[in-house]
Image (cartoon, rainbow, N blue to C red):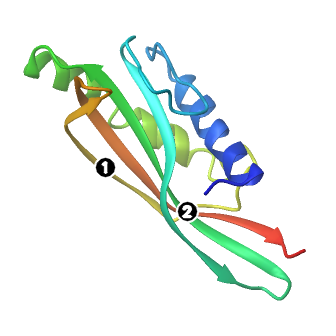
Amino acid sequence: MTTPKLQACIASIVDIVFLIGGIEVAPDYPEEKMEIFPFLVVYPETGRIVFGPAGVMTRLDNIVVQLHVNRKNLPIDMERVMTYSSSIPNALMKDPTLGATCDTFRDISYENGYLAWANIDTFALTFTIHDVKIQEILA
């Protein structure tokens, strides 16, 4: 479930990470089929919506940031994604409001391994930005 504010936050994350360089494709919305590597996808995975303060809805979203490379040779694939293991969180943490689209976020977790996108095997570095805080006035 995305809202205009959440989608603006996702678009800002895409822009922040894409500026690191070396990523070929980084759409604001994940595409059905991605064939140019490396590519980036960003999407909301889980979250909570809580009350407060009075008259305000607070979203705490967990947003996934995945960098995919074409799965060909494990040592080379791992080396390619691991070059981003510090640069992606560094870029995100330097801008804790993610381009002024959220109030803040709590932390970032990561994992790497085999994935697939539209039946194409990939090796991916996956970050989850936890508790991205977006507040909206209740209507």
Q: Which residue is mark 2?
A: 61
Task: Name the secondary structure under disc 2.
Answer: strand
Q: Nearer the viewer, residue 48 or 22?
A: 48
Relative to 98, 26 lies left or right: left
Image point (71%, 62%), residue name? 103
Please name the residue shown 73% across and 50% down the image: 101
**Vertical arrangement, residue 83 with respect to residue 128, above or below:** above
Observer-nearest of 109 and 68? 68
Above or below: residue 68 compared with residue 55:
above
Q: Residue at x 51, y 32 (%)?
A: 30
Q: Nearer the viewer, residue 117 or 27?
A: 117
Where's residue 11, x and y in %? 65, 37
Tell which tag, 1 or 2, sits nearer the viewer.
2
Q: How far across and how far down the image is residue 132, in percent?
A: 58, 61
Q: Position of residue 102 (x, y in %)?
A: 70, 56
CA neighbours of label 2 inside 10 A, class few (<14), some (14 to 19), many (20+): many
> In the rendering, at what x and y percent does residue 17 appear?
53, 31
Q: Is residue 64 left or right of residue 75?
A: right
Where is the N terminus found, in terms of image quarters? bottom right
Image-based side of 105 in relation to 38, left or right: right
State the residue lying farthest toward the bottom: 54
- Circle number at residue 110: 1
Among the two numbered marks 1 and 2 on one chain, the one whose residue lies closer to the N terminus: 2
Indicate the quadrant where residue 115 lies: top left
Amino acid type, mark 2: Asp
Left or right: 45 as drawn, with respect to 94: left
Q: Quadrant of the C terminus?
A: bottom right
Cα distance in 3D space between marks 1 and 2: 16 Å
